[in-house]
């Protein structure tokens, strides 16, 4: 099982349990806080992610850490302790990423990455969000990137789908047609 697959299972289970027993947003905040803490303290994260340290010691460290932080949801504490016991704490950043993705899906949010040759102004971004939102019936969040190699046009990525309307892509297709 890949790390992404395992993180997806943990994140999905966490959402299901937190919907029934707790607060989805609170769990998201707690996940974000623990990931930020691990990023801020590389020595701690190296210890918790190291295969040289037993899962029993990791669980003890995590238990002490959770007690010191205090006021955490029971759902979150159980998850982190279980990850420590299974020596899967290194999945926390990926679990957070997948958890956020799944929450956005549940909330009807769709993230779109748009790449153009020049930066888009706010008005054009809002127009794009509005048009795509009207078609999909979802809230659209656009992230823009600039790539001068596109020559012209744009490339939009919605989930795993890529819509390539760049001039560079059209020129490559024409070149291929001429060659064949």
Image (tube, rainbow, N blue to C red):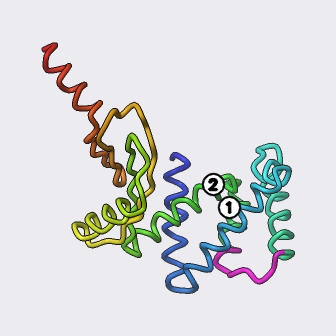
Q: Secondary structure at mark 2?
A: helix
Residue drawn at (25%, 25%) of the image: 172
Q: Quadrant of the C terminus?
A: top left
In this rendering, would 174 be left or right of 149?
A: left
Residue 140 has which mark?
none
Q: State yes or no: residue 72 in magenta.
A: yes
Image vertical order of residue 118 relative to residue 11, above or below: above
Magenta stretch in the rendered image: 69-77
Separation of residues labelled 1 and 2 (CA atoms): 8 Å
Disc 2 target residue: 91
Q: Position of residue 130 (x, y in %)?
A: 30, 68
Tell us which disc is closer to us: 1 or 2.
2
Q: Residue furthest top?
A: 179
Q: Name the residue beneath numbered marker 1.
A: 83
Asked whether, in this view, residue 145 is left or right of residue 167, the answer is right
Marks 1 & 2, CB-CB < 8 Å contact: yes
Relative to the observer, which residue lies in front, 78 or 33?
A: 33
Q: Secondary structure at mark 1?
A: helix
Up the image or down, 173 lies above or below 55; here it is above
Q: Position of residue 52 (x, y in %)?
A: 82, 43
Q: Which residue in the rendered view is the most extreme toward the bottom?
A: 21
Q: Residue 131 is drawn in which quadrant?
A: bottom left
Identified at 84% across, 76% down, the residue is 67
Count the labels in the image.
2
Q: Position of residue 175 (x, y in %)?
A: 20, 19
């Amino acid at each position: 099982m890949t790390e992404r697959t395992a993180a997806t299972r943990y994140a999905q289970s966490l959402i299901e349990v937190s919907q029934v027993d707790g607060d989805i947003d609170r769990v998201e905040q707690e996940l974000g806080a623990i990931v930020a803490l691990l990023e801020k303290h590389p020595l701690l994260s190296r210890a918790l992610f190291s295969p040289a340290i037993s899962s029993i010691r990791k669980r003890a460290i995590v238990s002490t850490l959770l007690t010191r932080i205090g006021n955490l949801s029971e759902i979150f504490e159980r998850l982190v302790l279980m990850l420590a016991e299974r020596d899967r704490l290194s999945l926390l950043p990926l679990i957070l990423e997948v958890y956020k993705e799944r929450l956005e899906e549940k909330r009807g949010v769709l993230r779109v990455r748009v790449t153009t040759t020049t930066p888009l102004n706010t008005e054009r971004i809002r127009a794009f969000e509005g048009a795509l939102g009207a078609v999909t019936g979802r809230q659209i969040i656009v992230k823009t990137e600039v790539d001068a190699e596109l020559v012209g046009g744009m490339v939009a990525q919605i989930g795993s789908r890529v819509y390539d309307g760049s001039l560079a892509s059209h020129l490559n297709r024409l070149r291929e047609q001429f060659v064949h």
